[in-house]
Amino acid sequence: MPKPLVNSCCLCQSTRNGSVISGILAIVLSIITIVVIFTTRVHFKTIIFDSISNDVVKIILVINLCMTILISLLMIAGVLKRNHYLMVPWVVLGLMIAIGLLISVIYTAVVFFIDGYVLTGVLWLIFGLICCAVLTYCWCVVYSEYANLSEENERGRYNKQPYRR
């Protein structure tokens, strides 16, 4: 049985509220990223496959962002309906995104350092690691709510221990 990692979100909110906020944040950031992809002239590169055209990379990225929106909606529905099974895709996705973001931040910073852009590499590393830490904390909050709901489902809603002051 999973154990909660944190007891509250930001020391003042419940993990339920924090999970809903994390889901809404993921949806908003995905929508903003989709808008930025289609309205700016940014050249996206992949780490492994260099021969893929920029348009194909944009399409793949938009499909991934749409899946993130769908999985975040599932997670929010799972929190509101108190169904931990609906939260599983977000828990798995969040962990994969955190690991992928960490690898991407380090790789991009190293490329900046190699190309001679030391200040850009340092700033990329600092802000990227801060984003990775925030994402990991949001994942911990959602995982804790998932663990709480999983335990509640296993034990039964009405057998929950009473609140003690």
Image (tube, helix red, strand yellow):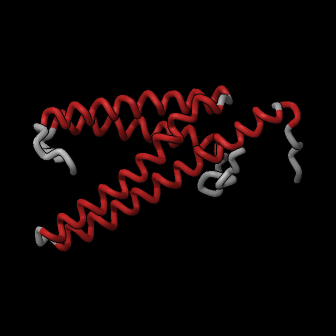
In the rendered structure, the answer to whether residue 156 lies left or right of residue 130 reads right
| Point 77% across, 36% down: residue | 152
User: Residue 24, how many percent across, how many down?
Assistant: 48, 37
Q: Tell me if 17 is positioned left or right of 94 in this view.
A: right
Instruction: Give the answer, above or below, for where 107 lies relative to 146.
Output: below
Q: Which image quadrant for residue 155?
A: top right
Query: What is the total number of numbered labels drawn onto the structure image?
Result: 0
Pick whichever, 61 or 22, lies toward us. Answer: 61
Residue depicted at x 47% and y 44%: 94
Q: Is residue 140 left or right of residue 41?
A: right
Q: Is residue 137 above or below residue 158?
A: below
Q: Is residue 20 above or below residue 116?
A: above
What x and y, as percent, mark residue 74? 52, 28
The residue lying at 30 percent from left, 66 percent from top is 125
Using residue 68 as the reference point, say whether residue 161 is left or right of it. Answer: right
Q: Residue at x 48, y 48 (%)?
A: 95
Give the quarter of the figure containing the N terminus: top right
- Quadrant of the rendered structure where residue 105 is? bottom left
Which of these two is toward me, 12 or 135? 135
- Residue 33 x %, y %: 29, 39
Locate residue 110, reporting x and y percent.
22, 67
